[in-house]
Image (tube, coloured by chain):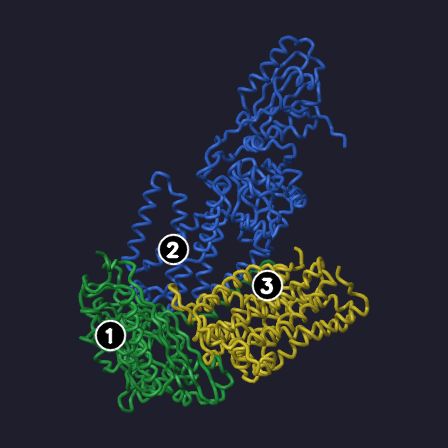
Chain colours: A yellow, B green, C blue
């Protein structure tokens, strides 16, 4: 089986990983920080991360068929590569535990109030493990299928919200005096775009590097537009004040949709939306498994999947029980994310260029 | 290796089944399905009255149980606060309560006076309620409401919900969902809630209750609510009977376009409200009466315009002077045009001083269906 | 290696010692004899009489005195009226040839012998297909005789590049297996992989193409089949032209095709012969049927147990009334009813034809109606289970029905434990499984994943006049059907 991903698969990988959980809570965050001009904060952040992702794709394309662990050995040597692998393992472990906890919290709050969070955490973790065990190429195809369904359903749903919502709630779209607020809001949007570093485990084929870079850049911009669309339509449906009050504003907004079939339209979100969410978390868990598999290359893959799954599930359950743990994670993850998404790939690319390992694309 | 793998898979599956344990599973037939909730206050006590649908089996005896008798029962729980009242209800229930089928939330005027905000926040937290449920106010006792009749013998909650939806479809009401009220309370805006009453034991929409700062401050009857609906509804439709030479003509009026232009000069808030209407003359009282020509039609247009302008003016004055509550959403229009100024000012006070000018125009035509002037 | 050339006597002694019943016709000519060995049940005795024994008798009558030193070659070329013959010299192959239904002619003065193919095995004649029934299109289908099947394929394919590789599989049965492909279209890797796997089979015997399939697939633990089953000769022709490899087994009326991808299970011959818009409609219907067959009962379980508030309020009350007298939770009811449906399905498959329709009516109406009256199942559940059953028969390739029948139960269990989220988790596991398996090097979920626009469109809309290329995911040598 070929282990490189196509540009199309890269698009869906980025889309589902970035929007995994954040899409549910971002209307709440944006309405509190940037208000009606939140779309601008999102687009600025999208542009920044589009640049970061270009760096990652450029690196991947320069070493076709390899992931970061492999080509970083060539760039910075074996020891540093192992240090980076350990760092990424810890980083993805944190992210997957955090996402797992949040996924369970959303399910509990919206749909299954009596089911214990630990039960949902374990059930989800088992599925993540089954998916991650299949490897990079299969997961990329998996993203392709779920991503297509997710995008079509999400765009259609939000379009309906655009028609049914109150446009006045998101106006004025831009006000000069609030520009400092919009710029400050970028800080709160960072979390929404963490996940681009997932590309470090997906090798590219190396053919048409320019196209891959363009695809990655436009994908992140598209995700910014998608977020803006989601945020604005949610606020239109709920109202600015209500959006600020709901942690999971997207689900509450979807519940408001008037339709002749379902009383609770968020059932559609429970199926299609959560399929996208689960897929996104699967991608993060796959990254954890891939780095662990490279680090412990002599171990059986199944053993690694089960081992990391147990650790991840335990960490998720512990995080749910220990209250300060969530706060710590929420403060550490953005910084670690910036390091993973920007700092490390940029340094690696610079060193690779200086050492002549990266040629100019044709 | 293969055997170990199989064992692992089986073990995993077992873990799933054992751990998940269907905590949230609840067979629909093992629940008490509530279709209406009434909140009332008497003195220091709050009471919940629930309408529970009676479930009769359809198996064995073909179509459901025949015979007469109501298809719903009513339970009341009383307490010092909402939680206690609910607890009192729970003590009477033989099955767990299911609120997902509630179609109507009713508050008596006594309860709405002070308890609306708390109740709406409670609603927001409870995932079981439909988020689009309609809320209404009644003047009567819950007891009187529970004795209301309806021709289809449905649960009353459905009847009330259907009545409100029919009113919306006919263009006579401007009811909105619970979420909008929550948003208005959080934004400290005034709002109106549909008021229902009983006429010969039949449910009817009899007007609106007006709220300021989430407190009940007044009532607008349905008969005098046309101006209000022109300001708030998307597609209001009213019918007018105008005097002509020796008779009357009847015209249906629809709102064509509504525009509210705010302005702010020297600390003075002012608005210019422009409303255009489309009126269709439907019929006259006498066929042979006065021919409809350009001159007459212009006269009727002017008469109608005058009536409409008067109604709109009255609605605005009522909101500014009588109720002192901006339920006509002028604040929103001002916020869109002057967001910074809006943030700095106390809108509830500024609104009372705002100068609001109205201008209306009517485009009158004759119905396409009937040739009124046929010889 | 120089083969030993045993005398005719040694051969006859060996055969007699084995003790298997065969017929022997001796024709003496003074200095020796001609021995004709055959198994009656496997030989066309009329042809044997007319084209072998009669001319031999005539020849002996004329040349009785100068038969000494007559060679097998001379007899075969000048005396026998047969076209399909071989001259062999390996005495150890005589037994195998006789068991294969051939006629062996031994001569005293020659260590070589003649092997004549007058094989005639009782088999059913070409009939209408039972698995791939279609309204329009040819109705001839494969039968158990490999020769007949070969003739059907040859009749439809007059391509000089059509290659037929024949093998004998099974130590005891020595079943003939023929592999077909078009040399300048088919992917060489697929061809060599299948050849390798056929040649590597080490087993007592193969009875049917289903048993051969087990040896050819990538993985036998897989619920989903990775090879197609072909009953019709026109379908076989289409598949060969797509670049597929066909495998026919002597004694089996179903051929195997490889590679086979998941979306191809929704293709039917009707789609090629009918209007393409109708074909599009039918394919969409089939995809919808797949989901209905798999998820209908899960939908009921999820809605009535976990997500009641998603249903319209009036219907919730009706549903509650329907379920008022049902003692079992929806998950138990769903599992029980699906089990009854599977019992019904199996029973109708094996019930004698004379009472089949009556049994069907009794079980469908009586059991269904009685179950509702007794309050065991809710009417809605019965409707959904029946719809699911009907939907499973919409799929043209029966091989996909079996995985659905099993997965349905797992899906109901998952839904019963965690509602629609449980169903989402199940679907994710199912999907990752489908995208990760391969059929002879071709991704199983192609062209959906990895996505290919041309193939994706063709998997819904197909018309030979607007499809100049073969499926690109098969990576054939020649991808062009016609010049654009």
Look at discs 3 and 2 and give the one toward the viewer.
3
The image position of residue B17, as x and y in percent, is: 47, 67
Q: Is residue B316 left or right of residue A321?
A: left
The secondary structure type at the circle numbered 2 is helix
Question: Chain for mark 2?
Answer: C
Residue beneath the point at 35% across and 55% down = C383
> Residue tagged by mark 3?
A12
Nearer to me, B84 or A294 = B84
The secondary structure type at the circle numbered 3 is helix
Name the mark on residue C385: 2
The secondary structure type at the circle numbered 1 is strand
Q: Is residue B106 left or right of residue C441?
A: left
Q: How many marks overall?
A: 3
> Residue tagged by mark 1?
B204
Labels 1 and 3 within one chain: no
Locate the C terminus of chain A and report the quarter of the image it occupies. Answer: bottom right
The image position of residue B341, as x and y in percent, is: 50, 86
Q: For residue A334, which quarter of the picture?
A: bottom right
Q: State whether residue C385 appears in this view.
A: yes
Look at discs 1 and 2 and give the one toward the viewer.
1
Question: Chain for mark 1?
Answer: B
């Amino acid at each position: 089986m070929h282990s490189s991903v196509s540009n199309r698969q890269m698009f869906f990988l980025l889309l589902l990983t970035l929007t995994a959980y954040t899409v549910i809570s971002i209307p709440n965050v944006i309405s509190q920080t940037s208000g009606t001009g939140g779309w601008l904060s999102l687009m600025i952040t999208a542009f920044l991360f589009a640049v970061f992702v270009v760096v990652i794709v450029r690196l991947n394309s320069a070493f076709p068929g390899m992931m970061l662990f492999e080509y970083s050995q060539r760039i910075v040597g074996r020891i540093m590569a192992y240090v980076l692998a350990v760092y990424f393992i810890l980083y993805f472990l944190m992210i997957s535990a955090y996402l797992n906890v949040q996924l369970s919290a959303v399910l509990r709050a919206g749909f299954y109030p009596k089911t214990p969070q630990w039960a949902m955490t374990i059930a989800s973790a088992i599925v993540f493990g089954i998916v991650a065990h299949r490897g990079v190429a299969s997961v990329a195809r998996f993203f392709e299928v779920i991503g297509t369904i997710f995008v079509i359903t999400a765009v259609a749903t939000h379009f309906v919200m655009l028609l049914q919502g109150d446009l006045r709630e998101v106006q004025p779209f831009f006000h000069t005096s609030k520009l400092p607020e919009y710029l400050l809001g970028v800080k709160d949007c960072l979390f929404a775009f963490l996940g681009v570093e997932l590309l470090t485990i997906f090798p590219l084929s190396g053919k048409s590097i320019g196209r891959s870079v363009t695809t990655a850049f436009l994908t992140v911009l598209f995700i910014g537009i998608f977020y803006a669309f989601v945020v604005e339509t949610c606020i239109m449906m709920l109202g600015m004040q209500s959006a600020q009050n709901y942690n999971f504003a997207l689900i509450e907004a979807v519940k408001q949709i008037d339709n002749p079939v379902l009383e609770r339209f968020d059932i559609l979100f429970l199926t299609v939306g959560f399929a996208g969410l689960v897929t996104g978390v699967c991608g993060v868990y796959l990254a954890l498994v891939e780095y662990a598999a490279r680090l412990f290359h002599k171990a059986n893959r199944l053993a690694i999947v089960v081992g990391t799954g147990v650790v991840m599930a335990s960490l998720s359950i512990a995080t749910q029980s220990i209250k300060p743990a969530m706060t710590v994670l929420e403060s550490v993850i953005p910084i670690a994310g910036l390091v993973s998404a920007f700092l490390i790939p940029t340094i690696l690319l610079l060193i690779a260029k200086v050492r002549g390992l990266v040629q100019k694309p044709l | 290796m293969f055997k170990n793998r199989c064992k692992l898979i089986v073990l995993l599956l077992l873990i799933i089944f054992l751990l998940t344990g269907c905590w949230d599973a609840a067979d629909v037939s093992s629940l008490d399905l509530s279709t209406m909730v009434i909140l009332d206050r008497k003195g220091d006590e709050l009471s919940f009255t629930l309408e529970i649908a009676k479930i009769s089996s359809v198996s064995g005896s073909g179509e459901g149980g025949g015979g007469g008798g109501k298809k719903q029962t009513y339970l009341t729980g009383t307490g010092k606060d909402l939680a206690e009242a609910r607890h009192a209800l729970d003590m009477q229930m033989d099955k767990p309560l299911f609120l997902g089928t509630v179609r109507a939330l009713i508050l008596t005027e006594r309860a709405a006076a002070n308890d609306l905000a708390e109740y709406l926040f409670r609603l927001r937290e409870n995932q079981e309620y439909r988020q689009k449920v309609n809320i209404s106010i009644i003047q009567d006792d819950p007891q009187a409401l529970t004795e209301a009749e309806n021709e289809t013998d449905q649960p009353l909650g459905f009847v009330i919900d259907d009545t409100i939806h029919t009113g919306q479809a006919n263009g006579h009401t401007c009811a909105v969902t619970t979420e909008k009220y929550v948003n208005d309370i959080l934004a400290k805006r005034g709002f109106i809630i549909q008021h229902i009453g009983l006429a010969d034991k039949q449910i009817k929409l009899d007007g609106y209750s007006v709220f300021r700062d989430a407190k009940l401050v007044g009532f607008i009857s349905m008969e005098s609510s046309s101006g209000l609906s022109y300001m708030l509804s998307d597609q209001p439709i009213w019918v007018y009977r105008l005097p002509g030479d020796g008779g009357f003509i009847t015209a249906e009026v629809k709102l064509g376009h509504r525009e509210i232009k705010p302005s702010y000069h020297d600390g003075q808030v002012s608005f210019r409200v422009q409303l255009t209407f489309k009126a269709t003359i439907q019929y006259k009282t006498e066929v042979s009466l006065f021919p409809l020509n350009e001159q007459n039609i212009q006269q009727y247009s002017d008469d109608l315009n005058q009536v409409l302008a008067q109604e709109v003016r009255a609605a605005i004055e009522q909101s500014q002077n009588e109720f002192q509550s901006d339920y006509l959403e002028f604040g929103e229009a001002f916020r869109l045009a002057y967001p910074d100024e809006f943030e700095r000012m106390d809108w509830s006070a500024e609104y009372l001083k705002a100068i609001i000018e109205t201008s209306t125009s009517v485009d009158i035509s004759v119905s396409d269906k009937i040739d009124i002037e046929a010889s | 290696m120089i083969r030993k050339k045993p005398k005719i006597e040694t051969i006859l002694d060996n055969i007699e010692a084995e003790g298997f019943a065969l017929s022997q016709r001796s024709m003496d000519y003074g200095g020796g004899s001609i021995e004709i060995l055959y198994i009656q049940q496997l030989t066309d005795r009329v042809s044997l009489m007319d084209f072998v024994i009669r001319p031999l008798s005539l020849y002996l009558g004329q040349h009785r005195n100068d038969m000494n030193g007559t060679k097998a070659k001379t007899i075969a070329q000048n005396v026998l009226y047969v076209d399909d013959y071989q001259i062999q010299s390996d005495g150890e192959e005589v037994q195998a040839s006789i068991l294969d239904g051939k006629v062996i002619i031994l001569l005293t003065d020659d260590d070589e012998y003649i092997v004549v193919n007058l094989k005639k095995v009782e088999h059913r004649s070409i009939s209408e297909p039972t698995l791939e029934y279609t309204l329009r299109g040819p109705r001839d289908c494969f039968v158990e005789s490999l020769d007949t099947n070969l003739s059907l394929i040859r009749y439809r394919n007059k391509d000089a590049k059509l290659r037929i590789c024949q093998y004998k599989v099974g130590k005891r049965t020595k079943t003939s297996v023929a592999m077909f492909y078009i040399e300048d279209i088919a992917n060489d890797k697929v061809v060599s992989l299948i050849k390798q796997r056929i040649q590597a089979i080490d087993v007592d015997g193969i009875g049917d193409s289903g048993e051969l399939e087990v040896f050819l697939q990538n993985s036998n633990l897989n619920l989903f089949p990775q090879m197609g089953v072909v009953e019709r000769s026109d379908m076989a022709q289409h598949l060969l032209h797509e670049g597929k490899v066909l495998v026919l087994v002597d004694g089996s009326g179903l051929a195997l095709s490889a590679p086979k991808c998941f979306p191809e299970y929704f293709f039917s011959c009707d789609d090629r012969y009918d209007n393409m818009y109708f074909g599009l409609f039918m394919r969409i219907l089939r995809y919808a049927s797949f989901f209905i067959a798999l998820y209908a009962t899960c939908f009921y379980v999820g809605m009535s147990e976990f997500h009641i508030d998603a249903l319209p309020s009036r219907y919730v009350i009706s549903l509650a009334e329907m379920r008022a007298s049902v003692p079992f939770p929806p998950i138990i009811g769903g599992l029980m009813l699906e089990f009854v449906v599977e019992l019904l399905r199996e029973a109708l498959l094996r019930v004698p034809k004379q009472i089949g329709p009556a049994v069907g009516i009794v079980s469908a109406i009586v059991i269904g109606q009685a179950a509702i009256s007794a309050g065991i199942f809710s009417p809605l559940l019965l409707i959904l289970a029946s719809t699911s059953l009907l939907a499973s028969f919409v799929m043209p390739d029966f091989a996909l029905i079996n995985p659905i029948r099993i997965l349905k139960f797992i899906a109901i269990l998952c839904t019963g434990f965690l509602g629609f989220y449980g169903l989402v988790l199940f679907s994710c596991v199912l999907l990752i499984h489908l995208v990760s398996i391969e059929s002879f090097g071709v991704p199983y979920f192609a062209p959906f994943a990895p996505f290919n626009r041309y193939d994706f469109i063709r998997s819904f809309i197909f018309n030979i006049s607007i499809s100049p290329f073969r499926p690109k995911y098969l990576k054939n040598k020649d991808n062009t059907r016609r010049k654009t």
